[in-house]
Image: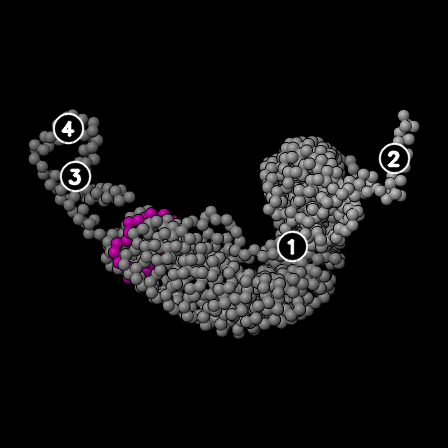
Amino acid sequence: MATGATHNLLLYLFWISVSFFSGSLQLCIEKEMKALLSVRSGFPDVDRRLSPWKGNDCCSWAGVGCHNVTGHVIKLDLSILQSQTVFNRSEVHPSLFHLKHLKYLDLSGNNLSGHQIPGSIVSLTQLQHLDLSGCGFKGEIPYQLGNLYNIEGLFLGFNRLEGVIPKSIGNLSKMSSLDLSVNRIVGGLPETIGNLTAMQNLELVSNQISGKIPDSIGNLHQLEFLDISGNNISGSIPGTLGSLCNLSGIVLGYNNITGRIVEFFEQLSRCRNNKPLHLDLYKNQFNGPFPSNFERLQRLIYLSLGFNQLSGSVPASLGKLSALQWLGLESNHLVGDITEAHFANLTNLYSMDISDNNLSVKVSQDWLLPFQAEAIIMGSCNLGPRFPPWLRNQTILNNLDISNNGISDAFPDWFWSLCLPEMWLNVSHNHMRGMLPRSLECFKNVRSFDLSYNNFEGFIPRMQLSYAYLDFSHNSFFGPIPKSMFGELRISYLILFNNKLNGSIPSSICTQRELHIVNLANNDLSGTLPDCWGNASELGIIDVSNNKLSDSIPRTFGLLARLQSLHMNNNSLSGTIPSTLQHCKQLVVMDLSWNKLSGAIPSWFGSRLSTLRVLSLRSNNFTGAIPPQLSLIPSLQVLNLAHNNLFGSLPPSFGMFSSMMASQNKKESAPLYDAPLYGGSIYYMESVILNAKDSELPFTTYVLLVVTSIDLSNNNLSSSIPREITNLQGLRFLNLSSNHFLGNIPNEIGLMGQLESLDLSENQLSGRIPSSISNLNFLGTLNLSYNNLIGKIPTGTQLQSFTNLSYIGNSQLCGEPLQTKCPSDNLTIDSRGTNEEEGMHKDDDEHGGIWYFIGFAPGFVFGFWGFIGAVMIKRSTRIKYILIIDRICIR
């Protein structure tokens, strides 16, 4: 039989040889060649990566592979590299499914957005490798994929796939790699995932997968890398996961996993192999004690347990992890001391973060770190009062955070002589003092210097910056802002507020194309603002408040298309609001208060600045009528036009502010400004001064998200208060005081149920106080003084809590809390007293009638007359009783 097989093989080889030499062997099948051309025509961007397909030998075409005997197409790679830009939409041609012998198909990176993964893909039953990542596919994962029994590698990541992971995925028992990362997949992990016994690499990053990790995951004994981070996974870590000793990477970060991790670490320590282990449990809800016995986890190279709820002390055995390169324990509830023993053998450590716990680092002054680190993050670790001398041997350090440590020292000279490149330095929220060197230019390409909230003084040094975050706020730096800070240097965030800087703002600041935030508030800066902002296209926040700036608002601010927050309050700016600002269509906060600005309030605010939430123009010289178009701003929550020279009536359209018509309590707490910061984000803390509850109060970002306020006080507004304003049922603060409003307080005022402060004082309002005002249960401040109101003050628990100062200056008001009694109260008391006196002298016949009822119901009479008799006999008792009854009825 073996001889026959050999004979057949020889005949087959002879046939191939004859065919080859005669030129009749076709390595490319014509039908498949035509299919390939049709398929490629649907992927136009591929032309920039692959050379044109020419000739009849399709097996030699770029991106195509054929079986070396049968000539069938078994490989097709039309992928687009991540570094390439995709310009055109692609389309999967049906001819693709004629290539029945395909084993390898890669269409990744093409633009197939709007399309679903074609169900016909399951007709390619020979597929072993399928990569459709980064194509923008939408819809659900086809359950038919479970019929691709030969598949070994499936990459569907970076699409817009929705729905659940189909249970049929468990049919793919040969699959060794599955990537569904960065989609919109929901639901739980199916138990059938435990059938994938050949699985080595499982990545489900950044979806919306929920529920528990199934126990069946313990069946994946070949699993080497597991990443399910960035989901909504809950429950505890299954006991079976720690027994998968082949694992070299476990990434469960950014989930809601709970429970203790001590047992999980104990299971991992039982694995007897030397495979390096990467363990990331960052940002979950793990609790309980910190693991111990690290002696048996020598293979750990990466340990991230930050942002959990772990408690207890950190064992000194952690210092025995000689292979450890990355350690993250930040933001837990850890306590106790960190000593030299905790670092003893960490000779390979290059990144460490133990910040924001209740730890105290206690090492000797002559001790040095046994490793050379790139990052040391030790915020809030009680390092002070000295600047840590054990840092002096660090030569590759580029990220140092020792903020909030009670350090009251100055920078030692040896630190500045390190001249560390691309430095990220954070020493904020200490008590550090002294002056900085005049030049820090040996620190090449500084990325971030945060020296805020200290006691530094002197001049700002010359520096070499590279897209830097620079925060020197809350210190005592003086002198001018260095012109050399700009020019060819790169600053992304310039935060210098709360210092003693003087002089003018250099015009070279306008050259910074990557500038996101400029905060120079609370200094002694003077002169005019540069008017050259056209190049600063990324600028989102400008705060120059509380300085001595003069002249007009720069017209080139209108070129800042991304400007979201503009604070220029408390200066001496003059002129009108430039019309160019209407092009800043992303503005959220505009505070121009306490200046000398004049002219009319622009009507285009309403039609052009639709994202505005806070508008403060108080304490200027604006004139004219209030433009009714302001009510067209759908997101406006705070409007302050107080202390100007505005006149005319209050527009009825003021009842149409949609963000004030309902409570803001349930709004999403989105930050007012979210700027990129080296792959992360920075949230800017807004602060606006509002007059609320008889005081000027600062409202910061998170409060501004829910506060609603209108302040039009101290103007010359007249006519009546429009009834429409009572539509603002989400308004919390309303101040119309010191104007010339006439007529009645709107009867529907009680509908404004969220009001906490209402000030209508010093107007010419008349009529009665509406009884509905007693419905304002949250009212903490009320001022109706100095008007022409009449009649009785309505009663209610809230209204009677105010003093007479809320009502004085209204000569015809009466009732509590005023001393003036209402005439109707006296009349009621007198008439009741007269009737009772007459009742004392009724004839015996009438008393006979009463005694009849006494005889009929003696129990009732004794109880009733025992009380009534005392009231009728003594006049003072009668009056007191009547007053008590009167109060009860009023309530």
Tell me the kind of residue under disc 2.
Tyr
- Type of amino acid at the residue the image marks with label 1: Phe
Q: Quick one: label 2 or label 1, which is nearer the N terminus?
A: 2
Q: Is residue 291 visible in the rendered structure shown here?
A: no
Q: Considering only order in the chain, which callout, 1 or 4, is on the residue closer to the N terminus?
A: 1
For the residues carrying marks 1 and 3, which lies nearer the camera in this image?
1
Residue 43, numbered label: none
The residue singled out by tag 2 in the image is 12
- Mark 2–mark 1 Cα distance, whole angstroms, equals 49 Å
Considering only vertical position in the picture, is 707 above or below 286?
below
Badge number at residue 87: 1
Comparing marks 2 and 1, which lies closer to the viewer? Answer: 2
Residue 624 in view, yes or no: yes
Q: Secondary structure at mark 4?
A: helix
Q: Residue at 63% of width from left, 51% of height from top?
A: 89
Query: Residue at image x 47%, y 68%?
Result: 579
Q: Residue at x 57, y 68 (%)?
A: 534
Q: Which residues are magenta?
A: 757-778
Q: Which is more toward the observer, 870 or 856?
A: 856
How many numbered marks appear? Answer: 4
**Residue under circle 4?**
853
Give the labeled residue for mark 3. 872
Of labels 3 and 2, the one closer to you:
2
In the rendered image, residue 522, in percent from the top left (x then y), is placed at 53, 66
| Residue extending furthest toward the right | 3
